[in-house]
Amino acid sequence: MREAALNPPPHRHGRLVIRLLLVAAAFFAFGFALVPLYDTLCRAVGFNGKTLKDAIQAKDVPPSAVNYARNLGVQFTSTLMPGLPWEIRPLEPSIELHPGELRTTRFLVRNLSDQTIVGQAVPSVSPTVAARHFRKLDCFCFKQQTLAPGESREMALTFVVDGDIGEEISELTLAYAFFPAPNPN
Amino acid sequence: MNTASHALDHHDGHHPAGLLRWLTTTNHKDIGTMYLTFSLLMFFVGGAMILGVRAELFQPGLQLMKPEFFNQLIGVHALVMIFAALMPAATGFANWMIPLMIGAPDMALPRLNNWGFWLLPPAALLLTMPFFLALFGIGDGAVATGWTLYAPLSVQGGIGVDFAIFSIHILGISSIMGSINIIATILNMRAPGMTLMKMPLFCWGWLVTAVLLIITLPVLAGGVTMLLTDRHFDTHFFNAAGGGDPILFQHLFWFFGHPEVYILLLPVWGLMPHVLSTFTRKPIYGHTAQVWSFIAIGVLGLIVWAHHFLTSGLPVPALLYFMYSTMSISLPLAVLFFCWIATMWRGAMSFETPMLFALGFIVLFGIAGLTGLVLADVAADAQYHHSYFVVAHFHYALFAGGIMGVMTGVYYWLPKWTGHMYSEKLGKLHFWLTVISFNFTFMPQFFLGLAGMPRRIPDYALQFAEFNAISTVGAFALGLSQLIFAYNVWRCVKGGDKATDRVWEGTEGLEWELSSPPPHHSWETQPVIKAG
């Protein structure tokens, strides 16, 4: 290029350009790294009301941990997401329990269509800070549920609310959203 | 434009002429001109879309269009205005002015520069094409999710979403290349003696903008890529049934989206002190303070994103953090305001069109800042969120702050670029019509928002009718006033009174030492800035 010859010694931009490209690539990767980071953060501090994904064992909830001095109200609600022709309701809309106490409750689901359909329940606890104190021993939300045409089923949830849940919480709500399963298999 | 080709004659006569010249040019002035022309064109395209929306909102009820089409218009309006009008205008300024201001012969990477521009028209075409495809029965129109593309709506949307995703990918690549080019130019090609702290504020504003773009745009690109794989390849980043989280998309989007506001505004904040100093015939007050304010705003802008979804159920500690960090941005911004006012203080002011636009900018952008503080308040935001109050707020920021800022720059530098003076009479007419009709358009929207009218809905309750009618009349007046601007620019490019090299009485800086228009190749011998 003729202009280049007229210039003072031509600048070398290669290294700077490569570094800047690396910054851009790092932030592209950062976007994807946010997915597990966000998930971990939400579970650790209970943002978004995400409950713990894995079941705990019955031996982890000793009867001695029950705090009989406190009463806690727990409400259950359920929602159907679009595309799932089911009916769902909690058999007990609300219960009273002591923190640390092991309880089982049931939800009723019914497939209103004439097709076999797979659904997946996604739980959420509010207030959100209570989520990490909500521990499940067994839950229908741990796996996908397949319902034959017209079939109805009672699904169980066995859980415990930690004995050390903050004093400021006197009532919490567990909401299930039932989605059509993304990968019926 | 033909003035630039005169300059061609006595330099590199072997450059191709006509269309091929613009396709193959690596000259920063040619590329700057193309960016600005493209921006002006897309400004009218985006404006036409929103006039359709305002026409529908003139009366309650549905008169002109289906709600689906209404949704497409608002979303594409925003994407066009942000990515195809405001950002290219700022990049056009950068291309034209940064080499002139720092005494460099051209941008650091001229070929990349050409490529960066020519990615824009295909991206704009991709974004708007679904409108036309729908006319032929292909797909159901353009992206109808609003510009924020929130999941799960965008996971369920039609082909318009895919077109928007690819368009954003291309626009992102173009912007990142432009940013790399600007950073390389600024860091490597300043005239000897021009230290970073002596560098003109416009270049500083752009340097911070370019860094923000390189940090945030890849995150948006990642987010929309996840959206694409959620839509077509059975991933579940944002699908709760598969273990994903729709709120995650809001985090990814606004990690980009909030700095984007400063990306759009920093070049304008950089330009303002030059204009204010010129027309008050005083040196810029607080150069160093303004540089550090730019940097502070850039850094703070990266860590406040969640104030865009304070109502999404964030826990209280997060709400408090995002509220206070957002409000803290008003401190460096206040430093900028005070520096602007101090620059004008007791100056010998004159009120040419660029100065009028700069003053209008300061007042109206101040309203944007104050209403932003209200929105940042968690308790108040619960009421204002997703209402017309928000729409009014960000139009005070992005029209009065962004577009009027760009117009300040165009009127200020147009005589330098073309060698001709624009019509001062038309310029002043344009300013007054713009500022009056702008307030007629958006001031009523504050009241509508306070009264509870939600945004992005094509119909509304009867009690909102009067303010909506006023707003629509204002919007049409505002849109039509911009034709004066286009005509004035066209006239100035074609001819007019000769501009002097310094153009205005109080100008300072290397760019004013060149002829008006500057030769096709300027600063082939770098100027030397004396110490002191």
Image (cartoon, coloured by chain):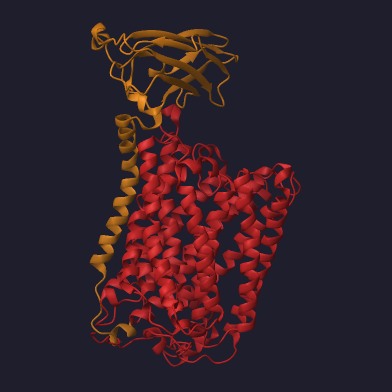
Chain colours: A orange, B red
Question: Can residue A185 be seen in the rendering of this structure?
Answer: no
Residue B134 picture location, percent across and down: 65, 48
The residue located at (33%, 85%) in the rendering is A2
Q: Quadrant of residue A36?
A: top left
Residue B398 or B470: which is nearer the viewer?
Answer: B470
Above or below, A60 relative to B482: above
Residue B449 picture location, percent across and down: 60, 47
Q: Which quadrant: the C terminus of chain B?
A: bottom left
Residue B297 picture location, percent across and down: 36, 59
Residue B103 or B281: which is nearer the viewer?
Answer: B281
Above or below, A16 relative to A23: below
User: From the viewer's perspective, is B158 left or right of B14?
Assistant: right
The residue located at (65%, 48%) in the rendering is B70
Count of numbered marks: 0
Q: Quadrant of residue B518?
A: bottom left
Residue B217 picture location, percent across and down: 39, 54
Question: Can residue B351 be seen in the rendering of this structure?
Answer: yes
The residue located at (38%, 65%) in the rendering is B335
Q: Which quadrant: the N terminus of chain B?
A: bottom right
The residue located at (30%, 87%) in the rendering is B527
Residue B353 or A167: which is nearer the viewer?
Answer: A167
Q: Quadrant of residue B531?
A: bottom left
**Residue lying farthest to the front in this orientation:** B346
